[in-house]
Amino acid sequence: MSKTIKSLFSVIVVLAMLASMLAACGGSGNSGNSASEGSPEATEPAKETAAETSGESEAAETEKKPEDYAGTITLWGWDQNYYDTTFKEFNKTYPNIKLEVTNVAARDYLQKLQTTIASGGELPDLLVGEMGWRGKAFNLNVWENLEAAPYNFDKSLVFDYLHPLTSNPKGEIVGIEQSVTPAAFAYRRDLAKEYFGTDDPKELEAMFPTWDALIEKGKEVKEKSGGKVFMFASTGDLYNLFLGQNQTPLLQDGALNVTGRVKIALESIIKIRDAGIVDKLEQWSPQWNASFAGGQHIFYPSANWSPQFVIKTNDKDGSGRWGLMIPPEGPFSWGGTVFGINKDSKNKELAWKYIEWLLLTKEGAEISKTLNFFVPLKSVYEDPQFSSVVDPFFAGQDVGKFWMEDVVPKISLPKISEYDSILTPSVKVALNVLNSDKNATLDDVLPKLIEEIKAKVPGIEVN
């Protein structure tokens, strides 16, 4: 090694030593530390603090604010007012998420869903499922499992009886109920007062603890009115009611138990028909709609959506003459719609933000209540005043508390299946026979009903 190189090397070593000494002395102004900051005891906590600070900083940078969520989500549906009203409120929190709605009638939705899948078309980001056919829709492999990440939906947040109605065949929650859909009796207070001596719901419930008690009182009404006033307008109304009170599922061990599902309902309808206390109007027909204002029918099965969309619509001058009560042998559930997410959606995060806000927050519950929808989130009802909705149309009855305190706790439901939707059209045929032929019996309609279902589902046991 040359003398020049040796001299250069010595200078470098000296400079390195001086730098080390300066580093050891630097920052020693913290006299509160008993150890030197150059020691392991001093430097290790400092490293941990820096790491924690860095992690917090990164979390702060990655955590989104509501305004950071931006894009357009798509939906097929049939309730434009509901979407417009709720989304306007949603946008106060999430201003940069937009909703694009394609109007599709509920009766056409399943068919559109199936044909779009078959053709390889694009489904909307948000999926909906109406009670009458959602079992079949859930069987299509297009719904996200909302219990899985990133949604991590905790089903204990909602009422337990809704779980069978929102699960696919694997038992995964794929939809969240838009409303709790309780159902009971709506009744004409004026007719109740005239024929039963009271229009008080609790007194009427005590008067009709069983269907036999109601039938006997109905015979008295028939006699007093000269056959002009009926207890019910339609056998279709009765079918919805009796089916809702039956906990027997249609699909059992791979077979369709049609007898177990509908026999009791048909027997009860025949008994009421033979007593002459049910009219022959076809449910949802113009004549049935007009009957609400007609004053010849006392009781109507009513879901919590019925007052807004059926009763008030068809009896515009009926304010003060309606009431709600528990029917004989208990309440039931009728109708309902779920929201879910298309598993191939490119906007899953935005779609979930809307569902979560609408159905699983107090803010969403508040705006839903203004539309007469009671979301399934149990926690909002811990405040007894939340469910309170005093309705002058129902003579000042607190209809909200009626639904949430008197009805919902008593509801239990069977698990739905993909075959449920095929039952209703066949039952309608049986009801038409019972309506048109007063001598038709259960033996005349049930075997034919079973044969018709068998023809629709070849290869499946039907009994």
Image: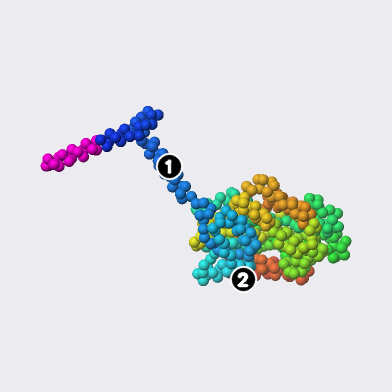
- Residue 154 drawn above or below residue 340: above
Q: Residue furthest left?
A: 2
Q: Closest to the observer: 311 or 435?
A: 311
Residue highlighted by disc 2: 455
* Left or right, residue 309 beside residue 103: right
For the point 81% across and 51% down, the residue is 203
- Residue 4 drawn above or below residue 307: above
Q: Closest to the observer: 118 or 29?
A: 29
Was residue 266 drawn as part of the magenta stretch in this picture?
no
- Mark 2 vs mark 1, CA separation in Å: 69 Å
Residue highlighted by disc 1: 53
Main SS of the magenta segment?
Answer: helix
Sequence-wise first label, 2 or 1: 1
Q: Which residues are magenta?
A: 1-17
Residue 119 rendering spot, x and y as whole percentages? 51, 71
| Residue 303, quarter of picture | bottom right
> Label 1: how many residues lie within 10 Å, few (<14), some (14-19) or many (20+)?
few
Q: Is residue 88 visible?
A: yes
| Residue 257, quarter of picture | bottom right
- Secondary structure type for disc 1: helix
For the point 64% across and 54% down, the residue is 367
